Image (cartoon, grey):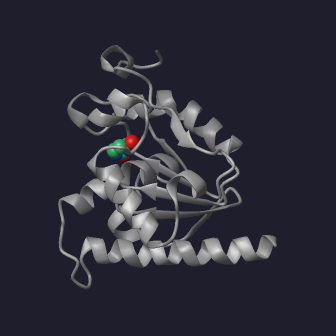
Amino acid sequence: QKCDLAEKRTQVVFGIGNPNSPIMIIGEGPGEQEDKTGIPFVGKAGQLLDKILESANLIRDRDIYIANVVKCRPPGNRTPLQDEIAACSVFLQKQLELSQAFIILLAGSTALKALIDPNASITRQRGEWIEWKGKWVMPVFHPSYLLRNQSKEVGSPKWLMWQDIKKVKQKFDELQNDKK
Ligand code: URA
């Protein structure tokens, strides 16, 4: 009930997956399907995300914990407002604190700006590792953006996403081996 989004939501979409997962993905906020089911990234964008992860042998239920910057659906899927992001940040901060993830993917501009720097640019910073609070953070395009840009040509958003996911898998394998 900390912000006005509570009034129109069907339910809170808190997070899903094993909090001991090595990778955490942070999106923007629930869409229609997420609001209906209570589970993050189950709509079209979520299905694409699953496919991208699977192409790098990363399995959602096994390797990933997923959450969003805001836990309630913004009406009409608009971008969450600053005060909504601020009201919800206590929940995300706690999720981050409790998570065992050593790699964090920030999916899209809202997550990058909310977590790292309000002036950050997803176009400039995607694909670059950020060392943050003892974790490796990688900003990547939001899957909804990829749904609007279907080309797979070299240099296209989908192609860039594939490069970024390969980097994530490489870091994941390196860090897993270090632990052994
Ligand atoms: N988009 C997001 O950012 N998060 C979801 O959970 C679904 C779509």
Q: Position of residue 121 (x, y in %)?
A: 36, 62
Image-quadrant location for residue 19: top right
Q: Residue at x 23, y 77 (%)?
A: 152
Q: Residue at x 24, y 77 (%)?
A: 156
- Residue 142 appearing in the image: no
The residue sitting at the bottom extreme is 154
**Left or right: residue 47 compared with residue 14:** left
Image-quadrant location for residue 125: bottom left
Q: Position of residue 90 (x, y in %)?
A: 58, 31
In front of the other: 9 or 90: 9
Q: Position of residue 70 (x, y in %)?
A: 43, 34
Above or below for 81 versus 103: above
Above or below for 10 versus 44: above
Q: Residue at x 66, y 55 (%)?
A: 101
**Left or right: residue 33 compared with residue 151:** right
In front of the other: 58 or 30: 58
Q: Which quadrant of the figure shows ligand 1?
A: top left
**Left or right: residue 130 compared with residue 50:** right
In front of the other: 167 or 111: 167
In front of the other: 12 or 124: 12
Q: Position of residue 71 (x, y in %)?
A: 44, 31
Above or below for 22 versus 15: below
Above or below for 91 versus 173: above
- Residue 24 appearing in the image: yes
Q: Residue at x 33, y 28 (%)?
A: 36
Quadrant in the picture for the C terminus: bottom right
